[in-house]
Image (cartoon, rainbow, N blue to C red):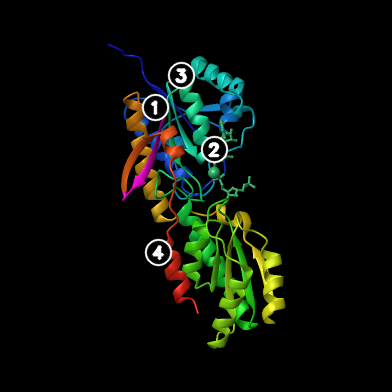
Amino acid sequence: MDTKQKTIGILTSGGDAPGMNAAARAVVRAALKKGMRVIGIQRGYNGLIHGEMVEMNMRSVSDIIHRGGTMLYTARCVEFREWEGVLKAKKTCEETGIDGIVVIGGDGSFRGAADLSKAGVPCVGLPGTIDNDIACTEYTIGYDTAMNTAMEMVDKIRDTSQSHDRCSVVEVMGRRAGYIALNTGIACGATCILVPELEMKMEDVIAKIKEAQSLGKQNFIVLVAEGVGGSNEIAKQIEEATGIESRATVLGHVQRGGNPTVRDRVEASRMGYYAVELLEKGIGNRVVGLQKGEVVDFDIQEALSMKKEFPMDLYKIANEISF
Ligand SMILES: Nc1ncnc2c1ncn2[C@@H]1O[C@H](COP(=O)(O)OP(=O)(O)O)[C@@H](O)[C@H]1O
Ligand SMILES: O=P(O)(O)OC[C@H]1O[C@](O)(COP(=O)(O)O)[C@@H](O)[C@@H]1O
Ligand SMILES: [Mg+2]
């Protein structure tokens, strides 16, 4: 019988997301409770390559459930994209006695986790990104907080926009995905929402604003996803075509910070616990996600090849009620 104490590593990788700390806390506590050793790897795959790590105990993850960012630090590690980097990481695992790793990050981090699993270190990915751009899960850790932050910011912009009878063009993050833009747009009553998943011509944006204007509307919010970009140019074109004074605001990294919402903390805890259960059984090369509210897991390659449908029904609703 194998009596060796299991050792798992945990790292956060790619862009930080509120709730990553709650996930790390769940992983560390669940694993320790099951009698495993836990190693906290710092700065994503960089820490694994260069041996930046600390032994975790129950108190290592105290006072972090409510904090944004990641106490493990994070990075985008170029070296790990090469097989040589993966082999260096594997060597660190062998030297440290790490039997498996929980990788909290986005799609890029999962590609790395698949490589490391292939090299012989079982990895389980937890979806941690504000963008919600991971196909195998309906929800990613950080998404809810980021949307709530964006909503609060747009609400503030709206006050000044309303006072000046202006049009405010607000750009939100999301990389190539428009989920933050769509939901924030609905929540803030945006007249137009521009997302990379759907082509929308400037003529259509202008026509919609003019239609709303003809119905007595005097101030406007136009929500632009990062994947569409060009918010300054969009504001300029709206002003030229409608005569409505327009301003652009790019919200930027404010959306990545702040205390995680209830939803982010709870889902991070559920998925973190589940990841440990997989590694306990020696199961690797998996990604954990949520489907219809249930925690599930997929083969990493299968997860990466899945496509996420853009919620057209929601977009239609947004479009039809924003005048
Ligand atoms: N194709 C890949 N192969 C191996 N590792 C990758 C790959 N893509 C990304 N990674 C690793 O994952 C890290 C995070 O990926 P990135 O795309 O920046 O963020 P996210 O995981 O949040 O999507 C990268 O810096 C790199 O170390
Ligand atoms: O902070 P950086 O490196 O400039 O990256 C910005 C990108 O990171 C994000 O905030 C989060 O993306 P990831 O979770 O995939 O890293 C994107 O919305 C944005 O495009
Ligand atoms: Mg990503």
Pointer 2 or 4: first along the chain: 2
Q: Residues under labels 4 and 1: Cα distance?
A: 36 Å
Pointer 4 or 3: first along the chain: 3
At label 1, which amino acid type do we have?
Answer: Gly
Q: Quadrant of the N terminus?
A: top left
**Disc 2 target residue:** 108
Residue 317 falls within the magenta-colored stretch: no
For the point 52% across and 49% down, which residue is it? 68
In the structure shown, which secondary structural element does the residue marked by tag 4 occupy?
helix
Q: Residues under labels 2 and 3: Cα distance?
A: 19 Å
Instruction: Say if residue 260 shows up in the picture.
Output: no
For marks 2 and 4, give the one nearer the viewer. Answer: 4
At label 2, which amino acid type do we have?
Answer: Gly
**Disc 4 target residue:** 313
Pointer 4 or 1: first along the chain: 1
In the structure shown, which secondary structural element does the residue marked by tag 2 occupy?
helix
- Bin the neighbour count of mark 4 within 10 Å (Cα to Cα): few under 14, some 14-19, many 20 and up: few
**Disc 3 target residue:** 120
Boundaries of the magenta span:
284-293
Residue furthest out toward the top: 1
For marks 4 and 3, give the one nearer the viewer. Answer: 4
Residue furthest out toward the left: 1
Pick the front one: 222 or 3: 222
At label 4, which amino acid type do we have?
Answer: Asp
- Bin the neighbour count of mark 3 within 10 Å (Cα to Cα): few under 14, some 14-19, many 20 and up: some
Q: Main secondary structure of the magenta part?
A: strand
Pick the front one: 267 or 129: 129
Instruction: Report if the beta carbon of the residue with label 2 is closer than 8 angstroms to ligand 1.
Output: yes
Residue 223, quarter of picture:
bottom right
Residue 278, quarter of picture:
top left
